Structure formats: C-alpha cells, structure tokens
C-alpha cells in the first residue's frame, strides 16, 4: 500500500536541508569566505585559494625552490576545476602556452597538495610521491594534455565519431 505524504510532513526535512549550508559555516570566523576548500570550485578566486592557510604551507613544502617557477607557469589560468576529487589550477606563463605551463592539485578533504611544471619540453612532478602510479589523476590527466600540446582537446581524434542514438 502506497501512502501519500502531505507537504506539511516534508516541511521539516526541506527546512533542514535549506539551513544545512549555514550550519556548515557556523564555526567559520567572521570575514572568512570559504569554510571548505570545495567552495572554491568554479570560482576565479585562485589567489585566495593559494593563500589559504590550509594550502599555502603545503604548496611551499611540495614546490620548494620551484615555487616561483610554478607560480609563473600558472600566471594565466581559468577557474578552479574539480578533477577526480581534486581542486585543479592549471595554466601557463604569459604567452607561454604549450611551452611553459603548470598545474597545482589540492585534495580538499585532507588538504594535500601536488603540482607539476612543464618547461623546455620536460615535466617535473612536485610531489611527496616517488612513484608515477601514485600521482593523482589530476596530475596525470594534465600531463596527458600537455604532452599532446592540448591537441586532444582541440582536434577530434580519428577514433571519435559524433552522432546521436
């Protein structure tokens, strides 16, 4: 037997769901815009993300002496993307697309940071991982795009057909 629920019976659930984002941010100090790193996804607040106290020291640790080179190589970038659960900032040096590029990947749940630099035809992974297989897809997929000179995004591969069912 199917029982119909009235709007009145759903009201407490809807109210709770509507208030949930406020509850998540309740412990955030006044003036702090992002309670969670996931809140950066889709935004252009890349400087704020990199300066976030949960991210900046980890980025410094993983990039070390390469930090300035990395920052130059992501000088031109778009919004913060979400790639396989990692926040991704990918870009290039001014007028350096396909020549000088970089990527920073941040996992928001434990604030781990990994990065890579493409320079002079070589890629340097900046990570505490020592095995390529342990790099996140956020880095590996970026490497694939850089190695193809981004052709896989711009030119339809021969084994891809466009059509409808």
Image: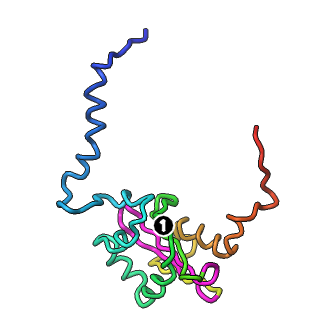
Q: Nearer the viewer, residue 78 or 60?
A: 78
What residue is at 23 percent from the left and 62 percent from the top? 32
Q: Quadrant of residue 111?
A: bottom left
Indicate whether 20 appears above or below 14: below
The local crowd at label 1, few if under 14, some if 14 to 19, many if 20 or more residues have their Cα within 10 Å, is many
Indicate whether 35 appears above or below 117: above
Please provide percent x and percent y for residue 134: 53, 70
Identify the residue position indicated by label 1 in the image.
Answer: 88
Please give the range of residues in magenta.
Answer: 97-120
Please provide percent x and percent y for residue 131: 54, 76
What residue is at 40 percent from the left and 87 percent from the top? 64
Is residue 29 rendered to the left or right of residue 131?
A: left
Q: Residue furthest right?
A: 158
Please provide percent x and percent y for residue 96: 59, 83
The prevailing secondary structure element of the residues shown in magenta is: strand
Q: Quadrant of residue 35?
A: bottom left
Q: Is residue 110 magenta?
A: yes
Indicate whether 160 appears above or below 70: above
Circle 1 — which element? strand
Is residue 116 rendered to the left or right of residue 62?
A: right
Q: In which quarter of the image is the C terminus?
A: top right
Indicate whether 154 appears above or below 20: below
What residue is at 38 percent from the left and 57 percent from the top? 38
């Amino acid at each position: 037997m199917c029982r119909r629920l009235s709007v009145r019976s759903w009201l407490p659930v809807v109210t709770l769901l509507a208030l949930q984002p406020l509850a998540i941010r309740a412990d955030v100090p006044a003036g702090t815009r992002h309670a969670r790193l996931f809140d950066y996804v889709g935004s252009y607040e890349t400087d704020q993300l990199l300066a976030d106290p949960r991210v900046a020291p980890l980025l410094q640790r993983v990039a070390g002496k390469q930090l300035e080179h990395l920052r130059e190589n992501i000088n031109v970038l778009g919004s913060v993307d979400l790639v396989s659960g990692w926040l991704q900032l990918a870009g290039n040096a001014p007028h350096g697309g396909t020549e000088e590029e970089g990527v920073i990947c941040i996992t928001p749940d434990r604030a781990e940071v990994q990065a890579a630099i493409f320079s002079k035809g070589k890629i340097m992974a900046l990570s505490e991982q020592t095995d390529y297989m342990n790099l996140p897809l956020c880095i590996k997929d970026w490497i694939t795009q850089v190695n193809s000179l981004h052709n896989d995004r711009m030119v339809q591969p021969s084994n891809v057909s466009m059509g409808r069912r």
